Image (spheres, rainbow, N blue to C red):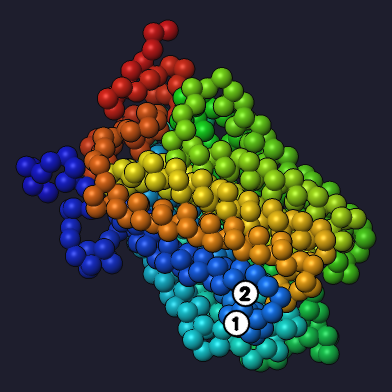
Amino acid sequence: MSGNKTEVEKNYLNDQKGIKSWLLTLDHKRIGILYLYSIMFFFFIGGMSALLIRLELIRPQEVIVGADTYNQLFTLHGAIMIFLFIIPGIPAILGNFVLPLMIGAKDVAFPKLNLASWYVYIFGSLFAVYSLVTGAVDTGWTFYTPYSTSTDTSVVSMTLGAFILGFSSIFTGINFIVTIHKLRAPGMTWFKMPLFVWASYATAIIQVLATPVLGITLLLLIAERLLGIGIFDPAMGGDPVLYQHFFWFYSHPAVYIMILPGMGIISEVIAVFSKKKIFGYNAIAFSSLGIALVSFLVWGHHMFTSGQSEFAAMIFSFLTFLVGIPSGIKMFNWLATLYKGSITFETPMLYALSFMFLFAIGGFTGIMLGALSVDVHLHDTYFVVAHFHYVMMGGTVMAFLAGLHYWWPKIWGRTYNEFWARIAAFLIFVGFNVTFFSQFILGAKGMPRRYYTYLDQYQPLHAFSSVGAFVIGAGFFIMAFYLIHAMVRGKRIGRNPWGALTLEWTTTSPPSHHNFEEIPVVKNGPYDFDRIRVENDKWIYKEE
């Protein structure tokens, strides 16, 4: 690197040019951006399919597609949003970019494995795209037997794609675990790590332990279709409900692969934008590990109506209530952090507050569905759809957007238009509640989920929900415009525009190629706002 480059030019964006330098890069920051481009592409496809679904449901009669195409659309939406966006989203994009920076490392532990994880993601996603061309799957994103073993759509290629994507998730999890254990900067003890790192660590444990179960399940489904082995076929001594046990043993922990990193982001944003030491640091850190543990024990609450024993249902109901405790610990500690804080309402904070409101509703309705007597009546209704989206979009996606806006200036060295960012945040929040709160009412009135048509009595609420979906879409299109504009023409910013105390804000924006000019030595905690203030990108220690 030449000695006359400016500070801004000595970074991963400018050191090497050309597509080849990106496709062969081992820099965790560039790999995070490669994930950003690819995952956002699939998010766009999944989002457009959601708008088509809501357009079709404006009235009971056919609007734009027939029944078979509708089944394919909601399967496409679910599979893309789960396997190609929400599960990899925060770890692969934001985790890849900021986790090494937050612990003072030059890179992840295994850079080549990190690049391989992106190529595996692309390879798996190509199978999913191929299945759309050859016969879009109509099973729903869960691929339940016996229908998934008998439909003539491209179940094999879609499930093979999901199987391959699992390896990407495992590679990322292994990398993060080793990186956190071995590459922390001098002085960074476990209890000086940012809470996003704790959340990423708990997530990585779930990725490594749970994902192989999904892989085996999908391989069994493929073998069932191609070889007729009979493991899920009652006529051959098999059991179709066994598939559900296998699938949800992975997929409920996978819910926390989606939400735990988001909770880590909220901890960062709440502390920084209230300029206050996080309340209950140890409790929040250990609650992440607690969620990771209990998440393996609650899969049966998806199957209360499947014929499992009453005793098993009772145990799973109790464990469902139990998993709400560590989530509640986080929520109350965030509220305590906000109390008497010097709160400012920049865009990341707006999304963090949206998360707290929406995830609280999602969590509360999850406890409702964990009660056996309630679940029997609401199972497979739109109430479950609303609950799921309040947790996944109201939780994971809102947290992802908080993190994306929080670290966007660090990624590109430029900031976005705050006015338009707040407009987009408002539209997404309002549109989300219009879309999905109405679905709670639909479900309570008995509207089944996944139905192509419905009784006329449900039409007003369906139309109201569909209007909200297009408001959400407008918010995301505005967001795409101002974020892309910020990448190329946004106002340049310094190292630490938010006045944060974690290590990623001590390096240049964008970060230098090797992250830090010299290895940082950690002397304080990541949230010591009672001892340190930031002025002109410098930490100033307050007088004792």
Is residue 338 visible in the rendered image? The answer is: yes
Q: Where does the image place residue 504, in percent across and percent down from the top left? A: 35, 38
Residue 298 horizontal/vertical position (percent): 76, 55
User: From the viewer's perspective, is 427 left or right of 61?
Assistant: left
Which residue corresponds to the image point at 46% horizontal and 49% vertical from the top-left? Answer: 424
Q: Are marks 1 and 2 in contact (CB under 8 Å)?
A: yes
**Is 70 drawn above or below residue 121 in the view shown?**
below
Dot 2 falls on a residue whose secondary structure is helix
Disc 2: CA contacts within 10 A as few (<14), some (14-19) or many (>=20): many
The one nearer the camera, 53 or 298, is: 53
In x, y percent, where is residue 267? 53, 36
Q: Amino acid at mark 1?
A: Val
* Mark positioned earlier in the residue sequence (1 or 2): 2
Write the residue at 66% across / 71% down: 57
User: In the displayed structure, would residue 430 be above or below residue 517?
Assistant: below
Question: In terms of depth relative to the viewer, which is nearer, 141 or 192?
Answer: 141
Q: Quarter of the image for the C terminus: give it.
A: top left
Image quadrant in which you'd find residue 146: bottom right
Amino acid on which the number 2 mark rests in the picture: Glu
- Residue under label 2: 56
In the rendered view, would you say 248 is above or below 74? above
Picture residue at 45% right of the left edge, 21% below the top:
529
Position of residue 41 in the picture relative to residue 455 (left or right): left
* Residue 350: image tag: none
Percent of width and height locating residue 311: 92, 58
Give the number of the disc on residue 65.
Answer: 1
Residue sitting at x 66%, y 75%: 140
- Mark 1 → mark 2, Cα distance in angstroms: 7 Å
- Front-most of residues 190 and 234: 234
**Dot 1 lies on which element?**
loop
